[in-house]
Image (spheres, rainbow, N blue to C red):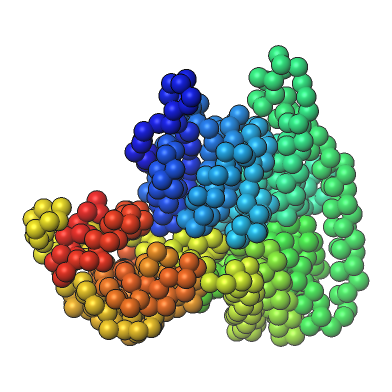
Amino acid sequence: MTSPAGPPPTGGGEGERRRVKLLAVTVCPTGIAHTYMAAEKLAQAAESRGIDMKVETQGSIGAENVLDDNDVNTADGIIIAADKDVDLSRFVGKRVLTVGVAEGIHHPERLIERVQSAPVYEQGGVPSASSPADGGKERSVAYKALMNGVSYMIPFVVVGGLLIAISLSLGGHTDPSGGLVIPKDSFWMDVNNIGVIGFTLMVPILSGYIAYAIGDRPALVPGVIGGWIANTGSLYDSKAGAGFIGAIVTGFLAGYLVLWIKKVKVPKFVQPIMPIIVIPIVATTALGLFFIYVIGKPISWVFEHLTSWLSGMTGTSAILLGAILGLMIAFDMGGPVNKTAFLFGAGLIATGNQTVMGMCAAAIPVMPLGQGLATLIRKQLYTEQERETGLASLFMGCFGISEGAIPFAAARPAQVIPANMLGGAVAGAIAGVAGVEDAVPHGGPIVAVLGAVSGVPMFFVAVAIGTAVTALTTVTLVDISERKRKGAPVVGVGVTGPQPALVGVGAGTAVAQKAVSVSAPAGTTADADHEVLSGYLTEQTVKVGLDARDKEAAIREMAELLARTGKVADVDELVATALRREEQGTTGLGEEIAIPHAKTDAVTAPVVGFARSDEGIEWGSLDGTKAKLVFMISVPEAAAGDEHLRILALLSRKLMDPGFRERLTTALDERAVLGVLSEVR
């Protein structure tokens, strides 16, 4: 969006001077409302100062108004208002200012002033960023890098884990000497091998994309190869690789090593090959050798001594041994500590001692089951992607694939790993005291279903209690962490962090409900056949005067307004869902606007309502304004597609236009309001 150009300034008889030209990129974690609100605010601020500005929005419906090479070449500065990583390689040699998306909404004028004196961005450098004094609650570079790695890793975990689970359940059988065995050269062995490839790749992908987020493209190769080395214990004489924790280490080491190499001054003739040959080769070699000879040896030493230590505990209390094994199994989910406990239990099966493996088998599924359960009992703490990963994690947990919990542990290690360990310890201790035995080196409910476990009832009791402990501890710690991080309510639609900003519009739908065609009254721009907001908002769901005086009453009144359509099956549940969403962060967007929303089966089809409040309702908006223009959006749980996201994006962008808000405020009746809203296209 380029602001209209006013008369260019002139300078002392030298003719016209070129107008200042700025660029911007806006994106919030969910790519919904704040992305477009920040874009409009920046464009308006630039226009008021006679500055040309083009803003690229990286929203949930894709990048729009994309900046091309000509835009960048002629720009005087670039503002990045984003709460996600943005590729800055195309802005090398330009002044770049990086801030959170909220800064673009609340302080666009300040950003325009600051970017004109921001430092020039160099390849691999760190752009200028806002400080806490600017009011931003910025995520650290390390956090963004970690989340970048996790987001790319998740599909590998899900695909690999589910394929392994399916192949085991449909093609496997128990074997005392080999655990769950799939016949060689069978169809299901081929499926299993494909899944193993996915699982094998997930750790290098995590490492590689952490490195990429820090050091850009030159860091990808050393990051991926470093992650593979970390996960391959045989390279440094260890029986188990360092797992996802090792991958996080190599990812950060690779990223910052590349940044350091980039600072080395080299002759001009070498510069073109630095990012594609010199830096990847040097960084990969240095990191690989460092891990093998420096980091790998301590890992191998720890592995051997843990095994010896456990061997000396076999005569101790079953409760204590079970708790310790559960703690170890849950700590790194496939890493050296986990493998030490697992191999210890598996090795004792041949001696006739199956109780130790029974303790391990009960603890193995607790992490994926617990994390999956957590996403179900406190949905508002998780993004849509995390909730989907949670369902896959539950499935993997049933088949004893503890790696299903890795995405959660990698994203929030301080909250998830302690919760996993507590649940694993409880499950292992219960299995130990109950004398549960497992005859095969595998864990999870699948081994009990296939008859490899003795003491099946207590085995399931141990798994169930451990899972519940992990889930409840996780949501408690995550909730506390989020409250501490935010410190105060965060603007609702498109907030930073792991909560879903738009619970209620997260998936959207492509099914447009046919609405009554609305003819615009005189003086409006609507045509007679235009459906307002794709037909989701009709004259039935518009009210020009709210009676409510507080937020809760307003939400109930809006829910009753939506019920006029016959698409609300349970008004009370719709109200309760919308209020739970408000507890996670206000949906008051500022500028006297609020957009409460709910995703719930209390509605049978998507529906949107609008109402005005002359006095305004206190909604907790950060700019202190009371909400006078209130939209309410609700979709069923099963809604799919991106139609609602598109409408919300258009609506959010249009609401940043003061003229549009003024027309909406002064529209005389419901039909006039519909005429104004028909401008949203």
Outermost residue on the front side: it is 12
Does residue 544 appear in this view? yes
Observer-nearest of 230 and 472: 472
Does residue 38 sit above or below 490 in this rendering?
Answer: above
Does residue 447 appear in this view? no
Observer-nearest of 633 and 511: 633
Q: Position of residue 406 (x, y in %)?
A: 63, 59
What's the residue at 53%, 38% (across, down)?
A: 78
Question: Where on the picture, by quarter, is residue 608?
Answer: bottom left
- What quarter of the picture does the N terminus occupy? top left
Question: Where on the picture, by quarter, is residue 305?
Answer: bottom right
Lateral position of residue 337 relative to residue 512, left or right: right
What's the residue at 41%, 45% (across, down)?
A: 48
Count of marks, rendered view: 0
Observer-nearest of 148 and 314: 148
Q: Position of residue 162 (x, y in %)?
A: 51, 57
What's the residue at 57%, 72% (across, down)?
A: 488
Lateral position of residue 265 relative to residue 83, left or right: right
